[in-house]
Amino acid sequence: MTKQTNIALALMLTAIYGTACISAAAGDQGEKSFILDIFGNANMDELINAKDITYVEGILNGANKQTDLADANQDGKIDQADIDWIKQIIGESESEIYYINCFGNASKVKHPLRKIIIAYVNTAEVIRVLGAEDRVVGVDSGGKNSLQSYPRYLSNFMILPSIGTNDCDAEKILELKPDALFLGSEGNCPDIEQKLIGANIDVVRLKTWSEGVQSLMMVTYMLDEVDNAEKYLEWQNGYLNMVKERVSSIPINERPRVFVDRWGNTTVTRGSGYSEAIETAGGINIAANLTGSLRSDGSITSQNTLPPG
């Protein structure tokens, strides 16, 4: 495969993945090999549907083992009420959705969500993929990874009110009266949960930086956009499968070795989403297996950045 072809594949993957790398963190999520971390997904697959009702019925009659996500209404027991709750999720009539957040903790968000604020660029991509931009009433700005740092790529969000930088202005959030605030990790708007206590504004933190498709589907159920998500994944998987097929014929020793130099002298490792995009395009991320500090000036040496031979 020529250098020009590799560049073309990289550009295609940029279009498919985008900033958030809405793809497989492990290389296969785009093919639905993940668990949808929403309570009610009793059979632990990628969707909530009639199969989950059947599975809970099996738990109640002793045929199936209890799973971590079978307690759909989070009342501490598995019973008919969970079957009824799953039916509500399928029918988009539930009052709340219980899910596992980016810290691995059970959390909940009201349903339906009519007004949301986004303070994380990766999540903005998810919202755009789902065609739910009209629900966004505010965004973050000022930081290097804020939505308003991408005026062309996320142009439709530029006219929205700002809630400030990474710290997030609680007063501005309260003024916009959203149903929920979508964030990334704890470094994104730290302590905002405490500042919004009693405001009836849910804070949703998902791993959209690494678990793109899984997070996409979780937001899908929160916003009732299952049809749009399925259409997107069908489109995405068609191109990803084509790229994987072409890349599979490239011998490992002929694949380009890649180093990503990011702002702040940082790089990307496996699990970042960006590293997976490099590997899917047929490259080798030389920093993929680094642990600890991600600072490129302290962890990368000339020895492992030079191409072999």
Image (tube, grey):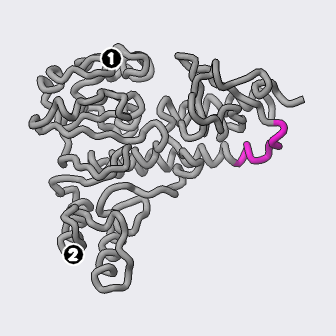
User: SS for tag 1?
Assistant: loop
Most foreground residue, 142 or 297: 297
Tell me the kind of residue under disc 2. Answer: Asp
Tell me the kind of residue under disc 1. Answer: Ser
**Residue 167, quarter of picture:** top left
Magenta includes 56? no
Mark 2 neighbour density, 10 Å: few (under 14) some (14–19) many (20 or more): some
Residue designated by label 2: 79
The magenta segment is 245-254
Q: CA distance from mark 1 to mark 2?
A: 46 Å
The location of residue 174, given as percent across then percent down, is: 13, 26
The location of residue 168, given as percent across then percent down, is: 26, 22
Q: Is residue 82 above or below residue 231?
A: below
Q: Is 102 left or right of 73, judged from the image as shown?
A: right
Q: Is 36 left or right of 224, judged from the image as shown?
A: right
Residue designated by label 1: 141
Mark 1 neighbour density, 10 Å: few (under 14) some (14–19) many (20 or more): many
The location of residue 21, given as percent across then percent down, is: 51, 36
> Does residue 242 show up?
yes
**Residue 284, quarter of picture:** top right
> Does residue 135 show up?
no
